[in-house]
Image: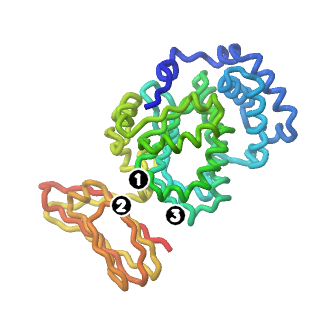
Amino acid sequence: MSRLSRKDEKEAVPRTLDEEFEAHKACVAALKETVRTIEGWDVVYAKEDLDLICLRFAQGFYDDVKQASECITNATKWRIAWKSDQVDETKTHPVEEKARKLFPSLFLHKKTKNDKLIFWAFIGFLRPKEYMEMVSLEEHKSLLAFNMVKQHRILNRVSRERNRLEMLTVFYDIKGVSMEHLKYREYLSIETSWAQLVLVEHMRNMYILYTPSIFATFWSFIKPMLAENVQKKIAIVNSADSETVLKSLFLDEDLPDFRGGTCRCGLGKSQCCPLLLEDSLEAVTIPPKREFKKEYAFEAGAKIEWLVDKNAIAAKFSITVSGESSLESTDGRGTFVASGPGTVVVSMTNKSSMWGINPFFTVQISY
């Protein structure tokens, strides 16, 4: 397991922003001059905190003016190309809702034991084929740009409020990644190249979690693409050590239950622990010795997706699809594509509890 330095893992009391600006004064001044030579800089930074942005690059490159100037120039040109000044962080991107269901992540909804803000991407939860069918490459680029600008603004605002330079601890969780995910490589290459421009701006350090032994080969190709200062911030953690590392960084109550913690956070309703179909889970009450049934109708070509929690499994959950194509399943989550019209019936029975039970479930039908 590759580890970050003790300095990165256990920091001293953070400096105030005034102390940070004083420590990096010369480099920050040089970077501001660099930015002002770029045509269009005043437009894209009109809504930004330019002083903090320059401070982030100065710190990220350890006051190496040449490297920091090159990177902030590229990042500024990137902002101009993607019209970052037009991003309204109070709104959501047009494709964000469908993208998040297929590629869930956490941003700022949790923090580590030492109060560090996080970004956590669950790569293994990504459904590559469906994602690429529903989100085009251009939409993916646009969404990525939107979210990066949004993250920068939020971090800068929080930094001013807390009077300290806030950076993200980033987690790339690859548990469950398979050969199927290689289909996503064109999308992934975009994220890797853009990471060069933005991660130095807001990343404190990164953990790549649940890496299999074969990942070392993959990493040998990716690592040379990253700037040296970015490489220093990355820890590669194997599958055997990942849960131990997570428990050292998080309180159990802030760690998703499927990663060794106790958090279910509304059974994954968007704010914390992402699960398939997390936005539409609903609760039902089943009295003792009673059965619950709900029926849905669908047309030909329907895609049927479902998710239930452990209480529903205990209630003998089953889902039955009838029509030209049929299915009967007791799996807690799944997907089925129907060739013709028909019905879906969800069934649960409370036989074991003397009190009412409250299972959560959802069924979504799309075309």
Asked if 348 appears above or below 321 in the picture, the reply is: above
Q: Position of residue 359 (x, y in %)?
A: 27, 57
Q: What is the number of the mark on residue 163?
A: none
Tell me if 150 is positioned left or right of 119 in this view: right
Q: What is the number of the mark on residue 275?
A: 1
Q: Earlier in the sequence, mark 2 or mark 1?
A: 1
Asked if 146 appears above or below 136 in the picture, the reply is: above
Count every numbered label the image shows and give the total.
3
Q: CA distance from mark 2 to mark 1?
A: 8 Å
Task: Place residue 20 in its image quadrant.
Answer: top right
Disc 2 marks which amino acid?
Answer: Leu
Contact, mark 1 vs mark 3 (Cβ under 8 Å) = no
Q: Position of residue 238 (x, y in %)?
A: 41, 37
Dot 1: within a 10 Å radius of its alpha carbon, few (fewer than 14), some, or many (20 or more) residues? many
Q: Earlier in the sequence, mark 1 or mark 3?
A: 3
Q: Position of residue 320 (x, y in %)?
A: 29, 74
Q: CA distance from mark 2 to mark 3?
A: 20 Å
Q: Which residue bears the numbered disc 3? A: 129
Tell me if 294 is positioned left or right of 90 in this view: left
Q: Residue at x 21, y 57 (%)?
A: 314
Disc 1 marks which amino acid?
Answer: Leu
- Looking at the image, is mark 1 or mark 3 nearer the viewer? 3
Q: Residue at x 57, y 62 (%)?
A: 132
Dot 3: within a 10 Å radius of its alpha carbon, few (fewer than 14), some, or many (20 or more) residues? few
Dot 2: within a 10 Å radius of its alpha carbon, few (fewer than 14), some, or many (20 or more) residues? many
> Which structural element holds mark 1?
loop
Contact, mark 2 vs mark 3 (Cβ under 8 Å) = no
Q: Which residue bears the numbered disc 2? A: 307
Asked whether 110 or 142 is in front, the reply is 142
Disc 3 marks which amino acid?
Answer: Lys
> Which structural element holds mark 2?
strand
Q: Earlier in the sequence, mark 2 or mark 3?
A: 3
